[in-house]
């Protein structure tokens, strides 16, 4: 070997074992996140396009595009008013679907109860009762005031349900929470019906709001509930780690350094705030908060960070498509979205129960 020849150094280290395996796992994890996320965003945009294009009054694609240009620009077209109304209800439907689905997912995680949603826990009934009492006793008739009444009623209902369930021998177990929510819902519905029967003015103001509808509502109503909606959305959107820790049980949750009651209280306020915002915008829309988290869980698994993200995308799709279906199923009349979600949600829930039982 020549003395001028460079000395052979150590062979470059090859990345093997855990390092390569870790990068591969990170790539697979990113693909599993971005793939469904892209698909979900595409589904939301497609559902919005269908909601704008389809309705009880038939418009050709050319008329829809011309009306859309007239609404977005300064032009004029005979279809502009119809397209503008469809845009408003599409925006309301997307916001309501996202809020209700996220609220249901957060409540299911907090209570460790797969049946929890704003309707079954009694939040919707409490919010509706507060709004009816506000209409009758205070003469309130604006959505901007409805939201605060709905929030007050929703929080009161959640507190009462938790207190009643906690007083049971087994504590606030999933079954006692569901039973307490059913009892409160029955009582609140009875009082609400009694008030409406005795006050025709309150009935006229309340009847379309009661069934859950996004029709005839201006998109500007979202601005009235925006402060509560945004704060609640931020709280619930970042609640995934808290909900994952809650699923492990109280002891492990404390072992992880989490302030159990404070964390759950903040997330519960966010969930009730989302439900109250949705109720103030469109009235009680049932089954969305119950069914959507279960559908998302079939794809994402038990990680609540993914369940919340998926629910925020699937909820708007479900509400926009059911509202669109309600416009065309009985032309020229329309079926309210709250009725359509109940009609379609009941068999969907039965299918989910049977699928879970089979597994």
Image (cartoon, rainbow, N blue to C red):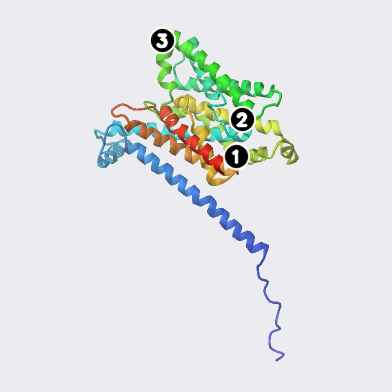
Q: Which comes before the other along the chain, label 1 or label 2? A: 1
Residue 105 point in image, percent of width and height? 56, 36
Residue 205 point in image, percent of width and height? 41, 16
Give the answer, above or below, for where 181 lies relative to 310: above
Residue of label 3: 200
**In the structure shown, which secondary structural element does the residue marked by tag 3 occupy?**
helix
Left or right of residue 165: residue 222: left
Q: In the depicted view, which residue is nearer to us: 241 or 172? A: 172
**In the structure shown, which secondary structural element does the residue marked by tag 1 occupy?**
loop
Furthest-bottom residue in view?
2
Q: Which comes before the other along the chain, label 3 or label 1? A: 3
Residue of label 2: 268
Label 3: few (<14), some (14–19) or many (≥20) C-alpha neighbours in 10 Å: few
Give the answer, above or below, for where 38 lies relative to 72: below
Residue of label 1: 238
Disc 2 versus disc 3: distance between alpha carbons? 35 Å
Furthest-front residue in view?
358
Q: Are marks 1 and 2 in contact (CB under 8 Å)?
A: no
Where does the N terminus fall, quadrant-wise? Answer: bottom right
């Amino acid at each position: 070997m020549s003395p001028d020849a460079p000395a052979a150094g150590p062979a470059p280290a090859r990345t093997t074992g855990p390092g390569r395996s870790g990068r591969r796992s990170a790539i697979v994890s990113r693909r599993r996140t971005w793939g469904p996320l892209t698909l979900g965003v595409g589904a939301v945009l497609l559902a919005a396009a269908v909601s704008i294009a389809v309705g009880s009054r038939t418009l050709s694609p050319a008329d829809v595009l011309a009306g859309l240009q007239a609404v977005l620009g300064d032009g004029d077209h005979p279809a502009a008013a119809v397209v503008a109304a469809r845009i408003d209800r599409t925006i309301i439907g997307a916001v309501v679907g996202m809020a209700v689905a996220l609220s249901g997912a957060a409540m299911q995680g907090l209570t460790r109860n797969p049946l929890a949603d704003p309707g079954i826990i009694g939040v919707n009934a409490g919010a509706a009762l507060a709004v009816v009492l506000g209409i009758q006793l205070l003469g309130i008739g604006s959505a901007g005031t409805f939201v605060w009444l709905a929030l007050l009623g929703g929080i009161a209902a959640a507190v009462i349900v938790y207190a009643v369930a906690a007083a049971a021998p087994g504590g606030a177990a999933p079954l006692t929470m569901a039973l307490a929510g059913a009892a409160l819902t029955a009582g609140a519905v009875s009082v609400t019906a009694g008030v409406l029967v005795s006050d025709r003015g309150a009935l006229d103001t309340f009847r379309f709001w009661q069934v859950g509808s996004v029709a005839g509502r201006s998109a500007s109503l979202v601005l009235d509930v925006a402060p509560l909606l945004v704060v609640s959305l931020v709280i619930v959107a970042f609640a995934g780690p808290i909900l994952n820790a809650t699923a492990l049980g109280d002891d492990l949750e404390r072992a992880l350094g989490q302030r159990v009651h404070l964390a759950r209280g903040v997330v519960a306020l966010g969930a009730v705030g989302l439900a109250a915002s949705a109720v103030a915008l469109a009235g009680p829309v049932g089954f969305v908060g119950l069914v959507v988290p279960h559908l998302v869980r079939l794809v994402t698994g038990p990680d609540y960070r993914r369940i919340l993200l998926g629910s925020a995308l699937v909820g708007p799709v479900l509400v926009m498509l059911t509202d669109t279906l309600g416009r065309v199923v009985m032309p020229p009349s329309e079926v309210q979205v709250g009725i359509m979600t109940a009609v379609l949600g009941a068999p969907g829930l039965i299918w989910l129960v049977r699928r879970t039982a089979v597994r």
